[in-house]
Amino acid sequence: MSKVLSSYKEALRVAEELSADFAATAVERDRKGGTPKKEKDAIRQSGLLNFFIAKELGGTGGTWAQLLTIIGKISRADSSLGHLYAFHNYQLATVRLFGSKKQWTALHKSTVENGWFWGNALNQIRKDVVATQKADGNYEWNGVKNFATGSKDSDYLTITGSENTVEGKTLVAAIPTNRKGVIINDDWDNIGQRQTDSGTLVFENVIVNKSEILSDPGPLSTPFSTARALIGQLIFANLFLSIAQGAYKEAVNHIRGKETKPWLASLAPSAQKDPFILRHIGELWVKLEGARLLTAKANAQIDPLWQKAENLSEQERGEFAISAAAARVAATQVGLELTSRIFEALGSRATTSALGFDRFWRNLRTQTLHDPIDYKIYALGDFVLNGTLPTPTFYS
């Protein structure tokens, strides 16, 4: 039985302690890349993996709003680790949304009992994995998935493949990571989110039992099951906001620490009094606060939606989709501007690699391309002008 935290208050304390440790090595680990094994094990041992799981299944029984706060704390210190922790919980939500009660309760309970850290191979952009049903009713999975975040050093995976039929129905399953034929490549080498292990995963004749297919109700089958995409959008909004907040906090502390000097033409006695630096810091605060409020609004809506479960209506689902999209767009746009423009306040000395200020922009630029915000903005405009709610997909 893995550790279980008794309350949200305890979870916040643990998250604060972990975040302080993660922040101390974030710049060095960003340069190194690869799997953050030590840090993932610290999360395993902390009890945070069980926070979102219901009390009756052995977990802490935390809410979505509480969980997103914890994700934010970790992400402000190190967005790769925040991303991995968020995706662990995203997969727990996936089995709840797509699987039968018997399936998801067993998987949640086993997560607590065995201390599982979840990863995924669910990228739906490329349909390169084929699932062929055999005579015994089980499936054989073959193909390659990219952007398999958290798959390396995970214990359990959610996976997706296209059924080898004319219709090519999408199948989602949950299997142990060590299943024979699952090959996780060590090939994630992008400019940002360098410790998320989001590289490729190969299926070579992987046998997936029929009982492991999440088909009741299955993906995109009910308003509640389609809420998975919205939870993902909200997770990303919180992740992006946290990266921007982390960059802003470090920049302010850097200026306060007298590391930034006023320009030679300035009449100000210090950088803290320089009118142009004050302008940058003030304007960025306003924009950051706007994104925070939009994200907080969406965060407050998710628990009532989750509690409705199978009673969730298409209208309610659609209204939440608008809030999640607005938060995602704001966090993306403000985050990208802030993590670039902050250098105008910090000055040239802040570009030294030792400080690692560039990691904030690189992390955001990498992850904000997960799915284009142009289509989120289009959906928002269509809603405002035409009253059209977003069409449910794996990304909207």
Image (cartoon, helix red, strand yellow):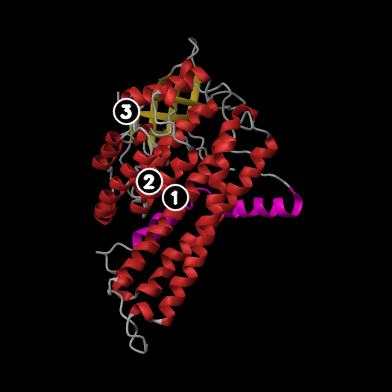
377 left or right, relative to 8? right
The numbered disc on residue 10 is none
The answer for how far apart the CA atoms under marks 2 and 3 are is 18 Å
Q: Count the marks.
A: 3
Q: Amino acid at mark 3?
A: Gly
Identified at 50% across, 12% down, the residue is 137
Q: Amino acid at mark 2?
A: Gly
Q: Mark 1 near mark 2, Cβ–Cβ under 8 Å?
A: yes
Q: Mark 2 near mark 3, Cβ–Cβ under 8 Å?
A: no
Q: Amino acid at mark 1?
A: Leu
Q: Label 2 belongs to which residue?
A: 82
Q: Label 1 belongs to which residue?
A: 239
Q: Residues within 10 Å of mark 3 (few under 14, many from 20)?
A: some
101 left or right, relative to 278? right
Residue 48: where, in percent of width, then height?
Answer: 35, 36
Q: Quadrant of the N terminus?
A: top left
Decide which of tag 2 and tag 3 comes sooner along the chain.
Answer: 2
Residue 19: where, in percent of width, then height?
Answer: 31, 49
Q: Label 3 belongs to which residue?
A: 115
